[in-house]
Image (tube, coloured by chain):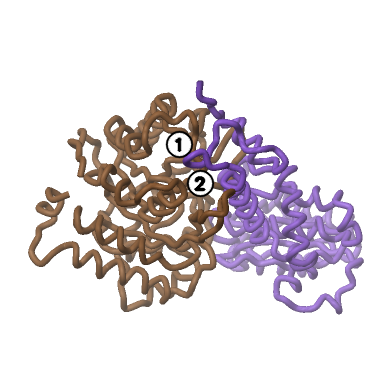
Amino acid sequence: MQTTVSNREFTTALSDPDTPAPKGIKGPDRKKSAKRFDIYRNNVVVGLIDALGEIFPAVARLVGEQFFRDMARLYIRANPPNSPLLFRYGRSMPDFLATFEPVAHLAYLPDVARIELAWLDAFHAADTSCFSAADLGAVPESELDDLRLTPHPASRIIRSRWAAVSIVSTTRSGASLADIDPTAPEDGLVTRPGYNVQLRRLPPGTATFLQSLIDGARLADAAEAAGRDCTEFDLPLALRAMLEAGAFSQRREEA
Amino acid sequence: MPDTPQPTQCSYGGAAIPPRAGAGLKTAHVDAILSDSYRIGFLEVHAENYMGDGGPPHRALDAIRENFPLSVHGVGLSIGSEGGLDETHVARLKKVVDRYEPGLVSEHLAWSTHDNSYYNDLLPVPYDEATLARVCRHIEHVQEALGRQILLENPSTYVQFEQSTMSETDFIRQIAVRTGCGLLLDINNVFVSATNHGYEPLAYLEDFPLGRVQEIHLAGHAPDVDDEGDVILIDSHDRPVDDRVWGLYETVTGRIGPVPTLIEWDADIPEWPILRKEAMMADRILEASAGPDASPRQRAARG
């Protein structure tokens, strides 16, 4: 009786380097299968490590390439992908980094990973126009307070207790972090007006303002919420950031 | 060469892929390809890279599609899986195919998904009756969902299964006969598997249903060693096509005439001119295989 190998047996051995290759797997002419089976193990892991390196280039640079690859190997074993779309992989990386003791001294790292995931989401988001300064100018003044906007599919807001936005921008550009105080909290906005993903720091209170608008609030209510949240909130400054970034696609029709 | 009558097929949509050299599309090459005086015969993309909603990948592919015939090559359908196909993924593939109307759509004789986990490789299947029936069901389902024929690619493998009861070529021929799918002959895979399992690549090609081949893949491979210290080849797609693979390619095209031929280069990706050089080499061999006055129909009959 020949030994049959189920997908389960194959993948169990594939995921655990300490498990021998399944019985029923062989080389030609009674050759052994250990190193042969290792080729599949290696292909899977190296492919996923490379994919994570492309998703999280700033995280990789901050911890060092070799350290990142070793860490990614542990991440992959604990969090295998559940989709063949690798640009959706790594969603739990921020949580992993937050509890991975060897990087505990880099407290901003989980937020850096969150920004990189937002960046990738924006990259693949649907194409649509942006609500522009001209669009805003066309809204009659009497309707401004009641204005509601539809978020652009690429827009993501990140609120960090650290200087994560500056750290990502600087690290991705290859510059030195020497001038950045990592303990200064930052809010960031990721957008993609046209085809280039943009990441910018937001002025004080603007994250609350934009998040309220994204959640469907009226312009007046969003501004009031932001003012309550942050005394330095400056509506004209917030509107300028919003329009420059292309955070919204169009006016939202009343439900 | 063994050949079998073509079963009746549904219509195959999309712009035809010419019997010339094509290249696997890489983002870094898009501008160079569009501005090059050498016109590559066609471009091929991995379907999964265009399953996002929008953004730069689709913009680049739109530009390519306007100027070149396009082939779509899936790497994540997991046709060999024990479980059923992932209907969500089939629907995603259909969306890509409907949007870009490629001249050819292909997938692998392999699996990569089990129990909701994705294993980022093309894993081998045993060549037995149960697997054959399952793979045929899956291919029929995909062809029905897409409303067109797909091509199935022969794998590169590193291990064998004790439970296999037939040869790879018999297995593939059976699939083609039962499902009416076309075949994508990866000659580098033939060379890699033949080396890894100790048989002659030419003997494999003698047994292969060459009459059903609608596309050829060529790529580079990397040497390693097996448990016994003997050479084993890895299907690495990270270097030029090996001279011995070029030799097999000349033999195959000499028999069946010109077939769309893709140069795959997926790791350590070079500048476009290096890839173009490989494509031009394939073009020269294709031209020679056409002969001075053979019509496509005569050439097909010769295969």
SS at circle 2: loop
The amino acid pointed to by label 2 is: Tyr
Q: Nearer the viewer, residue B65 or A104?
A: A104
Numbered disc 1: what chain? B
Residue at which label 2 appears: B158
Residue at which label 1 appears: B79
Please name the residue shown 51% across and 56% down the image: B231
Q: State left or right for residue A251 relative to residue B200.
A: right
Please name the residue shown 51% across and 24% down the image: A2
SS at circle 1: loop
- Give the tally of numbered discs: 2
Res B74 seen here: no
Figure quadrant of residue A255: top right
Q: Which chain is purple?
A: A
Graded by Cα atoms within 10 Å as few (under 14), some (14 to 19) or many (20 or more), the crowding at tag 2 reads: many
Q: Which chain is brown?
A: B
Please name the residue shown 57% across and 50% down the image: B228
Numbered disc 2: what chain? B
Q: State left or right for residue A235 relative to residue A44.
A: right
Q: Nearer the viewer, residue B145 or B58?
A: B145
Please name the residue shown 42% across and 40% down the image: B109
Residue A11 x %, y % = 62, 36
Q: Looking at the image, which residue sits at the far left?
A: B293
Whole-Å distance between the Cαs marked 1 and 2? 19 Å
**Quadrant into which the N terminus of chain B falls:** top left
Res A145 seen here: yes
Q: Nearer the viewer, residue A148 or B104?
A: B104
Q: Is residue A83 above or below residue A168?
A: above
Q: Is residue B264 above or below residue B157?
A: below
The amino acid pointed to by label 1 is: Ile
Residue B42 x %, y % = 32, 62
